[in-house]
Image: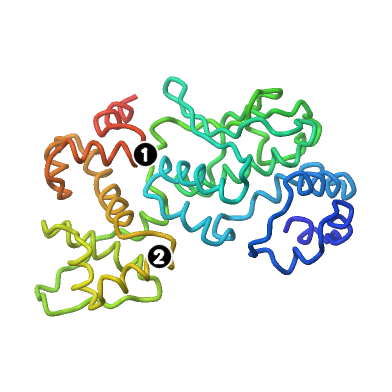
Amino acid sequence: MALEQKGIPVERHLSRANLSADLLDNADGDGIISAISMLDFAESAAMDSGIRDLGFWAGTTPLSGYGNFGARVAFAPSLYGAIKTFCNEVLSECSEADYYLSHEESRAWFCHGPVPDPSQQQHELYALMIMTQVIKLALGSDWHPSRVRLQTHNETSLRNNDYLLKTNIEFGAPVTAIEIPFKGLASALKPALEIIHDRKESGSDSHKTRFPTDPAIALQELIALTIKQSRQPTIEVAAEETGLSKRTLQRHLESKATTYTRLVDQVRFNLAIPLLNDESYSVTAISYELGYSNVAHFSRAFRRITGMSPRSYRYLLKK
């Protein structure tokens, strides 16, 4: 928590917002907390501590610190998928949450709907940075937004914020929004790209690949190898290769907040991007290279993952 990191007594501010200090011991629990109480807590703590951009610092916690919620977002195959997953999953954390993706010419905007009270700035700054964490999964930890829209009119608390110094900020906007280059939506998440790599074929079908600590990582490597061998990456093939039953395999993936189908989509997407970047490959040829029965199936899958067709992606690369 940002307050604890800065040596500020958290219990006192929880008490002022009528929240129990037990929250500190049950950060991952299933308890329901009033959104209004949390907003009051954030504003009171920011005012009393003198950290006027407290919400900003609270939002810098990586998504890996958000348990299964963060894992589901991080397992999306693309930035578009991560944002869509975030928008859906956040509703299970707060029923009033309003996050969505909008398009404007060659730009996309990751948006957060109207905050209850724009004068309570901490909620908005927290939302801004959580949204930024999602984008960084694909565009890298050093990525900074070039344009941001904030609902607050209060510029004072952000004057000394180094992160936003080079950002064009529009105050008094109807919603909170971060600009993303439209083609950036098709960017693969960095963790996924690190997993997919070439493997030397052993030439023997008798060898069974056993899971390391993370079964999802091993499966992505196995799926990629299966596709490169022009075989269909079915869950039955994966179960046979790993020496596990189909149900055991499914349980492993459930524990990682993902499914076999999502892993196949992720691998195919990561294999598709370098091929689409090479204009010597036609979209039709790529679809068969990735094991799709026809180009229409490939186009639908690519659009589901990125929000655009393979041909639209290629067009944006030229701009």
Which label's residue is closer to the chain start, 2 or 1?
A: 1
Side of 132 where 263 appears, left or right: left
The residue mark sitting in front, 2 or 1, is: 2
Name the spot of residue 209 as percent of width and height, x first: 24, 76
Residue labelled with disc 2:
254
Disc 2 and disc 1 in contact, CB within 8 angstroms = no
Residue shown at 77% from the left, 34% from the top: 159
Q: Describe the element under mark 1 as helix, strand or loop.
A: helix
Q: Residues within 10 Å of mark 1 (few under 14, many from 20)?
A: many
Q: Amino acid at mark 2?
A: Glu
Residue shown at 13% from the left, 37% from the top: 284
Q: Amino acid at mark 1?
A: Ala
- Outermost residue toward the top in this view: 105
Residue labelled with disc 1:
186
Q: Nearer the viewer, residue 305 or 135?
A: 305
Residue 300 vertical placement versus 27 (above, below): above
Name the spot of residue 190 as percent of width and height, x first: 42, 52
Snapshot quadrant of residue 163: top right
Residue shown at 30% from the left, 49% from the top: 270
Name the spot of residue 45 as percent of width and height, x first: 84, 49
Q: Quadrant of the N terminus?
A: bottom right
Side of 68 where 309 appears, left or right: left
